Image (cartoon, helix red, strand yellow):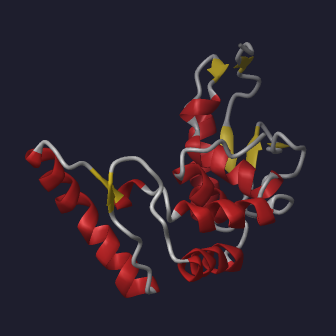
Amino acid sequence: MTALARRFYKTALPTPADGVALDQRTLRTPGGAVFAAPTAALAAAVAAEWEAQGEEIIPASMPLSQLAFAAIDWAPVRRDELVHYVGAYIETDLCAHRAEAPAELAARQSAAWDPLLAWAAEAHGLTPPVVSGIIAADADPAMREHLAAYARALDDFPSPRLRKRQGSPVRR
């Protein structure tokens, strides 16, 4: 396990250019790129995450920073991989896998997940197959391609959220 880095700055503030300054130093991503958010609101939220750190910097307590760093460092160079994962995800999404028993669990799953599936059908024309158990659902290849096309059209900042939401690590 890697030791946590000690906090090396006194203040973290958003910059006018939608970046973050740590004591007048520009925040950089783990890959060395200058951090630049697509919005002032995200820059302010990332600055707040850094400002909230104690004596040690705990990356797990900074989810917005992690996603933003992934968008800058990871998404541009691994876009094809991301698109593939998102397209294939329709077969394993939790919303499409239901328990048969107990009845109370099946009812709770239906109440929680049916609205999401209805939204996917209405907003994107996607109707993933709903199955019982944990074996991957057999989705129509056209549906997988539709989802992949959606991911392909996103800019770099939303892309890592889709991958992270799947429970996969964003970085190698």
**Front-most of residues 22 and 76:** 76
What residue is shown at x 50% (from left), y 62% (from top)? 91
> x, y (%) of residue 155?
71, 73
- As displayed, is residue 9 above or below residue 119? above
Q: Quadrant of the C terminus?
A: top right
- As displayed, is residue 131 above or below residue 11? below
> x, y (%) of residue 108?
16, 52
> x, y (%) of residue 66?
66, 44
Based on the displayed image, in which of its 4 quarters is residue 112 positioned?
bottom left
Q: Quadrant of the N terminus?
A: top right
Left or right of 9 on screen, residue 108:
left
**Front-most of residues 75 and 122:** 122
Based on the displayed image, in which of its 4 quarters is residue 109 positioned?
bottom left
Give the number of marks.
0
What residue is shown at x 73% (from left), y 66% (from top)? 156
What residue is shown at x 79% (from left), y 56% (from top)? 72
> x, y (%) of residue 14?
67, 52
Left or right of 69 on screen, residue 73:
right
- As displayed, is residue 52 above or below residue 75? above
In the displayed image of the protein, which residue is found farthest to the left? 104
Left or right of 36 on screen, residue 88:
left
Based on the displayed image, in which of its 4 quarters is residue 137 positioned?
bottom left
Residue 37 visible, this orientation: no
Residue 153 visible, this orientation: yes
